[in-house]
Image (cartoon, grey):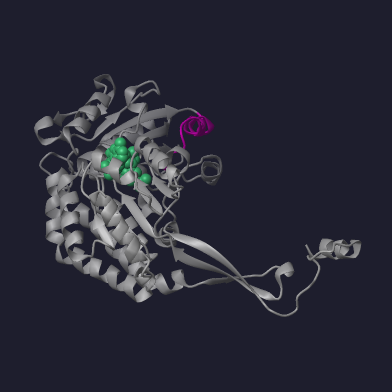
């Protein structure tokens, strides 16, 4: 038996004790986690800074605060979420009552991505705990300091038969994926998502796939251009563009493109994303640094383009007159490069988006109700905003997930609880008032009644 097999086997034995189903147990583990994070905040900041220079401010607002708020949400709402829900009983089943029970799926696996290393590994784990499961967490090895710290903290403070952080890369993942889990929750690229889906299919394990893609931001003539530029610059260059829901590219009405570019440049300068500034994160590794540099066509630079390999720093860069044949439009950028394309007619912009894979996010900047209506009705995307970017993620009442190539399933709030639960239907029949209609021998008279009842 391999190490991971043994851990999973122990988790299965522990799950069968039914301890994880107890609501008091779940809440106490959530609170224990909150205390663990808060006692070690300084170390959490240091580890992420070592991985890619992310500031304490950004780490708190985009990772730690979200984990605290998830823990509070599930602690405060757990009784309601876990309570069996009564539903109506249809005529043929009367007298009787019907209920939906939320039961934990069992032994779960959470696989995280590196770009928000704490949030993407621990937020699904928090939902798994709330729903009453055990969990093995595999953070991304691409952010090695945060992976190591999560393993140290969780493996020391929680019993491994309940929660266990597995360290390692593709080799270890390949071992882990041979095992039979009751749920796999994956965050990462569509390419790896396929590998996960295939491995899960062998055991008929249900999956949530939180993937990526090219998320457009459409800016129309009617938009408040200055506000659009301010919000886009913030959402794009946060985490140096290494955000799954960052606007990947802009489609701007040709009438306002020049003005928009000026505002974008203005806000990039105003937000001070220089190499020495704490508010600007570094590129995660040399491979991504080189990949991103190759996406910057010097002929198309409107602003930026400078880089420093020794610091893995890439200046926020705006590209103009970009075509779909350019390298930058062939893949998810996942870095601080923002191409802008212009369109003549709004429908043309929508059609361009419709021709691509369904994105994880889409954004519209407009004051026109017809434009807003067409955007929400015609485009298919995981989630998005009108007149903002990224912020839809911060509302726990909205599901967060992709569609098609950008993912399957969703989480956050109730949706996170449901992602790790099975909805068990139970029909409870009375032992009196039994109609004999369904029982043989059949007759025309019974058939007439059945037609009426059904
Ligand atoms: P990735 O797919 O390379 O890695 C994700 C995880 O999969 C890591 O834990 C890694 O160890 C594991 N992995 C990698 N290769 C594997 C293999 N061959 N077999 C088994 N496991 C393997 O993704 P990444 O580079 O960490 O993250 C970037 C991608 O993730 C982007 O596409 C981005 O849009 C997407 N993303 C999506 C979300 C979301 O919430 N939808 C959030 C963040 C990132």
Give the percent coordinates (x, y) of residue 235.
Answer: 31, 45
Q: Magenta stretch: residue 305 in it?
A: no
The residue nearer to you, when weighing 70 against 251, is 70
- Residue occupying the point 37% across, 41% down: 196
The residue nearer to you, when weighing 222 against 280, is 280
Q: Is residue 363 visible?
A: no
* Quadrant of the frame with the C terminus: bottom right
Which residues are drawn in magenta? Answer: 345-362
Q: From the viewer's perspective, tell me whether residue 48 is left or right of residue 187.
A: left
The residue nearer to you, when weighing 388 against 85, is 85
Give the percent coordinates (x, y) of residue 198.
Answer: 42, 39
Vertical placement of residue 102 versus 282, above or below: below
Q: Is residue 56 visible?
A: yes
Instruction: Find residue 38 and report its image quarter.
Output: bottom left
Q: From the viewer's perspective, tell me whether residue 338 is left or right of residue 453.
A: left
Q: From the viewer's perspective, tell me whether residue 87 is left or right of residue 26.
A: right
Instruction: Find residue 217 and report its image quarter.
Output: top left
- Residue occupying the point 41% across, 28% down: 342
- Residue occupying the point 70% across, 69% down: 93
- Residue occupying the point 31% across, 57% down: 9
Residue furthest out toward the bottom: 432
Vertical placement of residue 173 versus 104, above or below: above
Q: How many marks?
A: 0
* Ligand 1 placement by image quarter: top left
Q: Magenta stretch: residue 347 in it?
A: yes
Give the percent coordinates (x, y) of residue 263.
Answer: 30, 38
Residue furthest out toward the right: 444
Give the percent coordinates (x, y) of residue 382.
Answer: 45, 45
Residue furthest out toward the front: 1
């Amino acid at each position: 038996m391999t190490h991971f097999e043994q851990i999973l086997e122990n988790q299965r034995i522990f799950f069968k004790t039914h301890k994880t189903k107890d609501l008091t147990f779940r809440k106490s583990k959530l609170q224990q986690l909150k205390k663990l994070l808060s006692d070690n905040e300084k170390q959490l900041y240091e580890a992420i800074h070592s991985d890619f220079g992310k500031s304490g401010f950004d780490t708190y607002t985009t990772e730690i605060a979200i984990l605290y708020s998830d823990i509070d949400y599930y602690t405060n709402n757990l009784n309601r979420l876990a309570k069996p829900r009564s539903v109506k009983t249809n005529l043929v089943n009367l007298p009787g009552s019907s209920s939906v029970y939320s039961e934990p799926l069992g032994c779960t696996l959470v696989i995280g991505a590196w770009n928000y290393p704490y949030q993407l590994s621990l937020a699904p784990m928090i939902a798994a705990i709330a729903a009453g499961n055990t969990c093995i967490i595999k953070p991304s090895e691409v952010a090695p300091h945060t992976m190591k710290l999560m393993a140290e903290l969780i493996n020391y403070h929680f019993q491994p038969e309940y929660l266990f952080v597995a360290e390692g890369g593709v080799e270890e993942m390949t071992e882990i994926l041979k095992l039979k889990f009751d749920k796999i929750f994956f965050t990462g690229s569509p390419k790896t998502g396929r590998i996960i889906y295939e491995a899960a299919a062998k055991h008929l394990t249900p999956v949530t796939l939180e993937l990526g893609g090219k998320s457009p931001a459409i800016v129309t003539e009617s938009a408040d251009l200055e506000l659009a530029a301010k919000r886009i610059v913030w959402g794009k260059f946060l985490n140096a563009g290494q955000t799954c829901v960052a606007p990947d590219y802009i489609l701007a009405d040709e009438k306002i493109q020049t003005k928009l570019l000026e505002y974008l440049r203005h806000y990039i300068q105003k937000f001070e994303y220089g190499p020495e500034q704490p508010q600007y994160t570094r590129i995660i590794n040399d491979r991504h640094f080189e990949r991103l540099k190759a996406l910057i066509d010097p002929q198309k630079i409107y602003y930026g383009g400078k880089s420093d390999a020794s610091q893995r720093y890439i200046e926020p860069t705006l590209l103009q007159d970009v075509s779909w044949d350019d390298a930058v439009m062939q893949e998810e950028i996942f870095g601080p490069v923002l191409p802008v394309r212009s369109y003549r007619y709004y429908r043309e912009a929508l059609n361009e988006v419709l021709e691509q894979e369904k994105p994880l996010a889409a954004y519209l900047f407009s004051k026109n109700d017809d434009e807003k209506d067409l955007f929400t009705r015609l485009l298919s995307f995981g989630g998005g905003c009108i007149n903002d970017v990224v912020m839809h993620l911060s509302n726990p009442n909205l599901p967060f997930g992709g569609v098609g190539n950008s993912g399957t399933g969703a989480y956050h709030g109730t949706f996170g609880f449901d992602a790790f639960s099975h909805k068990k239907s139970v029909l409870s029949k009375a032992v009196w008032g039994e109609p004999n209609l369904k029982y043989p021998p059949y007759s025309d008279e019974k058939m007439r009644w059945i037609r009426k009842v059904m």
